[in-house]
């Protein structure tokens, strides 16, 4: 049975906080005007002054143009949960996959923004962490119960842990890290008990990428349609997993998918959902075979 671990990290959250100010021209976008407006209210109460909006605007064009290399900044912090802020900055600055131009035009100014914003953000984060203690513990207990229904998945892929970074600065999408021994993902902290199910769906989505991306057997890119295909595959896979392990949640899952796709009105029924997230027949066959392997009773 895999260990379920909940992690809160102000250093990791600082990364996603800065990324929330940057508009990205692909599906990985973490930009949130609502989040920015709320944080700017807090900024006005701080003795430190830093124009993060302006800094983000200055570097986001280069970030978008070279996202295939620079997008790794979303994931590097998840690999070392116990590292200090100084260690995290060094890892970003010394990452071998960045070119000299990447470092000059994005990485170095990004790290400078992290340094300046940390003077404001860390006190905000620590306050949030203290003030949400009771709520978080209730949500964690419910979330752990839901994740336990996925033990067959964890066991099949021989994962020792299911790690959930619960983030105060991610408000949309999530982030998953490919790991040999663990499932690792970052998702928003549930604001209340009603948000536990959506958090579970998002965690399962990020975990599922780790084994469904392998089925594609190709490099996944934002530019050639493979990212969209990988997303459709995960969305379908999770639906069939939920139908197997927790069938009563299938309609809630369809409603969640409908909502995050921006739908209004009547949510998907199964037929509309399967039509919307279509994948090639041979890929669907491999997916269903994989699910049957780990969901056998």
Image (spheres, rainbow, N blue to C red):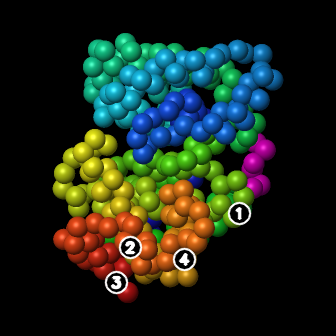
Residue 237 image position (x, y, % from top left): 37, 69
Q: Label 3, label 1: how many angstroms apart (C-alpha)?
A: 31 Å
Find out whether the residues at labels 4 and 2 contact each other: C-beta distance under 8 Å.
no
Extent of the magenta region: 130-135
Nearer the viewer's eye, disc 3 or disc 2? 2
- Relative side of 118 to 158, left or right: right
Find out whether the residues at labels 3 and 4 contact each other: C-beta distance under 8 Å.
no
Q: Which residue is mark 2?
A: 274
Q: Mark 3 or mark 4, which has the lower sequence index?
A: 4
Residue 9 location, quadrant: top right
- Quadrant where the C terminus is found in the figure: bottom left
State the residue at coordinates (65%, 55%): 190
Question: Disc number at residue 193?
Answer: 1
State the residue at coordinates (71%, 42%): 129
Q: Which residue is mark 3?
A: 296
Q: Mark 3 or mark 1, which has the lower sequence index?
A: 1
Q: Mark 4 or mark 2, which has the lower sequence index?
A: 4
């Amino acid at each position: 049975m895999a260990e379920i671990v909940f992690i809160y990290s102000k250093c990791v959250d600082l990364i996603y906080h800065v990324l929330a100010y940057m508009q990205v021209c692909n599906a990985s976008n973490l930009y949130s005007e609502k989040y920015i407006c709320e944080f700017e209210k807090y900024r006005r109460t701080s003795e430190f002054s830093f124009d993060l909006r302006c800094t983000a605007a200055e570097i986001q064009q280069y970030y978008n143009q070279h996202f295939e290399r620079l997008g790794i900044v979303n994931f590097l912090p998840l690999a070392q949960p116990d590292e200090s802020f100084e260690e995290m900055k060094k890892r970003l600055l010394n990452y071998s996959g960045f070119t000299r131009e990447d470092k000059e035009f994005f990485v170095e100014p990004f790290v400078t923004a992290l340094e300046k914003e940390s003077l404001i953000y860390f006190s905000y984060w620590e306050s949030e962490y203290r003030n949400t203690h009771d709520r978080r513990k209730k949500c964690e207990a419910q979330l752990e119960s839901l994740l336990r229904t996925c033990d067959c998945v964890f066991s099949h892929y021989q994962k020792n842990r299911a790690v959930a970074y619960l983030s105060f600065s991610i408000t949309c999408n999530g982030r998953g890290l490919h790991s040999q021994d663990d499932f690792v993902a970052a998702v928003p902290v549930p604001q209340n008990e009603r948000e536990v199910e959506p958090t579970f769906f998002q965690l399962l989505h990020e975990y599922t990428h780790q084994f469904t991306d392998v089925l594609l057997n190709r490099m996944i890119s934002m530019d050639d349609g493979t990212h969209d295909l990988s997303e459709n595959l995960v969305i379908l896979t999770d639906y069939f997993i939920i139908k197997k392990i927790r069938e009563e949640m299938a309609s809630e899952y369809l409603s969640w998918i409908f909502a995050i796709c921006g739908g209004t009105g009547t949510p998907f029924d199964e037929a509309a959902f399967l039509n919307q997230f279509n994948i090639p027949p041979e890929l669907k066959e491999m997916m269903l075979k994989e699910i049957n392997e780990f969901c056998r009773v």
